[in-house]
Image (cartoon, helix red, strand yellow):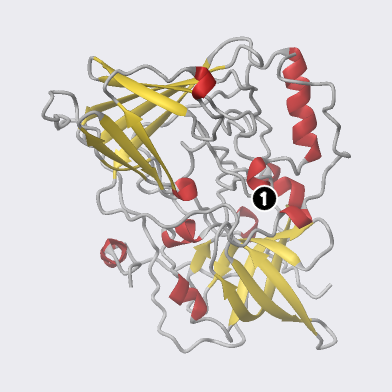
Amino acid sequence: MAHRTSGVMAIFLGLILAAIPAFAHHSLNAEFQMGKPTELKGTLTKVEWDNPHVYWDVDVKDAGGNLAHWSVEGLPPSYLHRSGVNRSDMVALVGKEVTIHGRLAKDGSKLMFGLDFVMPDGRVIPVGPKAGDDNP
Amino acid sequence: MKHQSYLLGYLALAAAAVFAVSASAQSNQNSAPSQGKKYAPPKLSKDRSKPAPRAADGHPDLSGMWIERYGALGADPAAGKPAQSRAGGSAEASSYPTDALPYQPWAAEKAKQLHDAENTDPLLHCEPYGIPRIWGGPHPARLVQLPGELIILYERDTSFRIIPTDGRPHPDPADIDPSWMGNSVAKWDGDTLVIDTIGLTDKSWLGTGKNAGEGSATFHSDALHVTERIRRPDFDHLAVEITNDDPKVFTHPWVFTWNMTLAPNEQMYEDVTCSNEKDYQHQMPDKPAASDAGKSAKN
């Protein structure tokens, strides 16, 4: 698969990530492998800043140098605003290298639910729900 | 731009902290200056000393922009990075049942089937939250109290309610169309506004309780009767106590609370369920969707 799991990601802290309901308004567990941390690194090609979820399109090079087109889903725009990042912050990154940590889709598509978005300046922006928070 | 709001002021005050990006060797360092600052959401007041303002009729004025919490988001724990602190979290924790909701046995079975089917949440089908599920999430709500009515504007679902507070009764139930927000009337009980809501469509989910809002399958019947008791115990706080009474599906009424703090500088963003919905196509049920033919709210 055209993604890379870093050694740090493999340090599975044993948190019960299946209990991540948090503020997602529907079942993440139905759609994503919540127990499988994944890192995606590539070029951000598009930002869909919309409800109910922001999406980032990322081109990832596989070992053979081929480009795979990935889609990363995050929480809604209002949540991201309250995490200190707005639409123009994200759109400004189109064309740049980004690193996103998250959870792969279960259905085999090139889709990941994003939890951390690492900006080029080093800031880590949480874009997913907080682990273990089960408040609706 | 509207996002350049008071939040930037808080950013300027935030303590500088740099998250070490231990996992990645940035091969293409962006030339933009590193801001190196950790975003801290606004702190929610814990001051309970100031009295609530009063409206001209002597009742507490519930008006304001209210939010239950910031800090909904957390860093990926498996990435070895610290979770973002819940700075400014709710002053007094809201509560909801920690056990499964008190469903009657047949209803608990139906809830399990709905949950196992994984793709039955109305939100996945671009349907509204409704009452009481609208109370939830890190979304502000704006209350506007006028003589004879309370207007509530919810960021969640970009929705609103206009609730008469003059003590009038509900219309004849035969004249009430089932709806997601229901038919609400309210009256004061001392300093507590009591909102009574009936006429709720049985298409909605309650969204509270264990596994709330997460494919919770918290269905209900057309007999659902919701009572919201709203108080402003002090200037900075709003306490909402919500009772769900549905004798067709539950063994007894149950209560949850939603405690909010004044957030006067908060703005509201649009929150619609399906401007760009793409999740439904990826839902993977653990089990085949069970038919609920033969199971009805009428038991």
Q: In the current view of this chain or complex, which residue is farthest to the right?
A: B288
Q: Nearer the viewer, residue B206 or A127?
A: B206
Based on the displayed image, in which of its 4 quarters is residue B119 positioned? top right
The quadrant holding residue B61 is top left
> Where's residue B225, x and y in %?
51, 19
Please determine whether, in this image, residue B142 is positioned above or below residue A91: above
Can residue B46 be seen here?
no
What residue is at 36 percent from the left and 57 percent from the top? B40
Position of B295 with respect to A124 (left or right) is right
Q: Quadrant of the C terminus of chain B?
A: top right
Q: Quadrant of the N terminus of chain B?
A: bottom left
Tell me residue B54's x, y (percent): 14, 29
Q: Count residues near mark 1 (Cα–Cα under 10 Å), then give few for <14, some for 14-19, many for 20+.
A: few
Of residue A134 and residue B246, the one placed in the foreground of this image is B246
Going by the numbered disc 1, the residue's amino acid type is Leu
Residue drawn at point x = 86 percent, y = 33 percent: B290
Q: Is residue B191 above or below residue A66?
A: above
Q: Residue at x 65, y 29 (%)?
A: B218
Up/down of B18 relative to B113, above or below? below
SS class of the residue under badge 1?
A: loop
Residue tagged 1: A13
At which x and y percent is residue B24?
62, 75
Position of residue A91 relative to residue B169, above or below, is: below
| Most foreground residue, A5 or A92 | A92
The answer to whether B155 appears left or right of A20 in the picture is left
Q: Is residue A110 left or right of residue B84?
A: right
